[in-house]
Image (tube, rainbow, N blue to C red):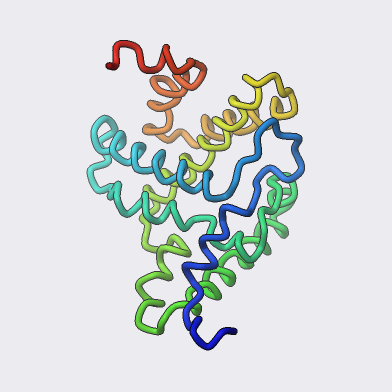
Amino acid sequence: MDKNCSYPFSALLSRMKYITRWGLMRSSRTETLSEHTTEVAMLSHLLAIIGQTYCGQTNLRPETVAVAALYHDASEILTGDLPTPVKYKSEALRGAYKALEEESARSLATLLPDELQAPMLPYLTGTLLTTEEKALLKAADRLSALIKCMEEEASGNTEFASAKRSQLQALQQMDCPAANYFLRNMLPCYAQNLDELTGGCP
């Protein structure tokens, strides 16, 4: 390592823009890990506010959930994006991948100065989130995947039809009130074009 490069944590995270998702699928447009994490952060922040406002979840911390979402897939810099059908094929694989993610998160933290490792690690692992907040982040992650499937479908690509059904079913089974609100009131807007979305906006 270059002697002037003491702490490569941020430089390594910046490489998320080179990691592509949906590796087993034929996509009409490539989605990077950076795009995904940004979208999940925005969605999880919004879901937390929806939860506070409409669902009585007053203990949610929207800003904390959003920042954790920015780091929720950071370990994929080291592991790559393991396709969902492989990751969830069996409990053994799921457990092994979860352990790999946690070890990768800890490895990333060691690329920071000693004093910064303890404050950063809970964001990398998600351990600073409550059970409710973890559920919201997971719902936002699935919503991001569902939106990607809808975009591919809108472009005429039928490759994502099964994935779309799976993500929608998984979201419905989560029975997350904030996600259900989003599905009813916000998700349909993703089918609109720019003029329809902006409406009367100047």
Q: Is residue 58 left or right of residue 4?
A: left
For the C terminus, which image quadrant?
Answer: top left
Residue at the image point whose x is 66% and y is 63% from the top: 79
Residue at the image point whose x is 65% and y is 34% from the top: 29
Q: Is residue 54 left or right of residue 95?
A: left
- Res. 150 image quadrant: top right
Q: Nearer the viewer, residue 146 or 112?
A: 112
Where does the image place residue 66, in percent across and percent down from the top left?
A: 37, 49
Residue at the image point whose x is 76% and y is 43% from the top: 24
Q: Is residue 127 left or right of residue 172?
A: left
Where does the image place residue 186, in percent across and percent down from the top left?
A: 41, 23
For the N terminus, which image quadrant?
Answer: bottom right
Residue at the image point whose x is 32% and y is 41% from the top: 48
Q: Is residue 29 left or right of residue 126?
A: right
**Would you place residue 196 above or below residue 138 in this image?**
above
Q: Nearer the viewer, residue 124 or 28?
A: 28
